[in-house]
Image (spheres, rainbow, N blue to C red):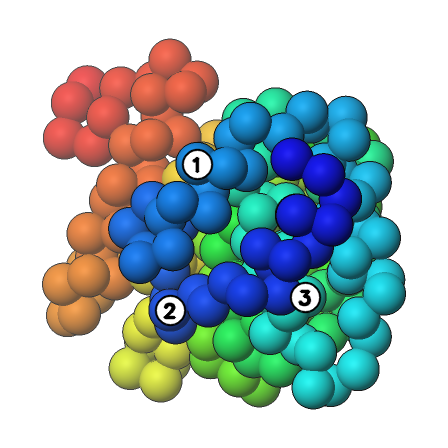
Amino acid sequence: MTKDELFKLLDALTLPEHIIDLLEAPNWRFWRKGQSLDRQQVFPLLREFIEGRTGKAEAKLRENAYFLLGRLLRDGMEPEFCQFLIDSLSRETDKYVLHTMLSGIGRLQLPVDIDVAPIIACSKSNEWLVRHSAIVALGMSNTDASRDAIRYWVKQEDEKHHKFELIYANAALGYIGEPGDIALLEQHIYSRIRDVKDSAVYAINNIKQRFGMNPLGEK
């Protein structure tokens, strides 16, 4: 596939909202064609495509490229282009574009030396769609900065108001939390909100399993 062919596909692609995998979309043939591309050639071309379409009216076109970039990074991590994807969060304002980007990032195992500051900023967004997907994405970054950002949400006491933030943050901390986080999570194991309680129990047991500790209810 040539550069012109790739750009033409990206220009024509229409992604449904909240898409999880392009294979589920009507345009799944696009992904089949994308699989034939040489990775070392595709990543620079995607960056070129994104940097060449900076206007607000071209946000959807950038979203197409961000989606493909995130999907290709799942098949093979390239830190330079992973960092480019994350840094691009700071340049986008459309909540649906940001959600697509963060959803892609949230399915990657992020290298520990990747700067996640733009994801942390998104986790404080006023837009719940952005905020929630950013919290999930932080669970893919096993760093102190990510843990601290997730702990902020786990510490929230107003469970009714922050129900979904707590659910996502509990789960995320379960992936990258440390034994010292168990006491923090325990404040939610008696929650009257079932999903908050279940996510806290799951997170605690996940941490204990990772560190060779007995799960809740066992001595």
Looking at numbered disc 2 in the image, what kind of residue is underneath it?
A: Pro
**What's the CA distance linking mark 3 and mark 1?**
20 Å
Left or right: 188, with 216 as reference point: right
Whether the residues at callouts 1 and 2 have beta carbons within 8 Å, the answer is no
Q: In whole angstroms, how far apart are the C-alphas of marks 2 and 3? A: 14 Å
Return the residue nearer the eye: 157 or 34.
Answer: 34
Q: Residue furthest top?
A: 212
Amino acid on which disc 1 is placed: Arg
The residue located at (19%, 19%) in the rendering is 219
Look at 69% across and 27% down and name the residue there. 39
Q: Position of residue 190 (x, y in %)?
A: 19, 59
| Image depth: mark 1 or mark 2 in front | 1
Residue denoted by label 2:
16
Which circle marks residue 62 in the picture? 3
Q: Which is nearer the eye, 202 or 158?
A: 202
Q: Quadrant of the N terminus?
A: top right
Q: Which residue type does callout 3 highlight?
A: Arg
Mark earlier in primary sequence (3, 1)? 1
Residue in the image at 17% along x and 70% along y: 193
Element under label 3?
helix
Residue 75 on image: x %, y % = 54, 26
Relative depth, front residue between 214 and 14 = 14
The label on residue 211 is: none
Q: Position of residue 197 (x, y in %)?
A: 21, 57
Q: How many other residues sit within 10 Å of disc 1, few (<14), some (14-19) or many (≥20)?
A: few
Q: Which residue is mark 1?
A: 32
Q: Secondary structure at mark 1?
A: helix
Label 3 vs label 1, nearer the camera:
1
Distance between mark 1 and mark 2 Cα atoms: 17 Å
Quick one: label 2, few (<14), some, or many (20+) residues within 10 Å? few
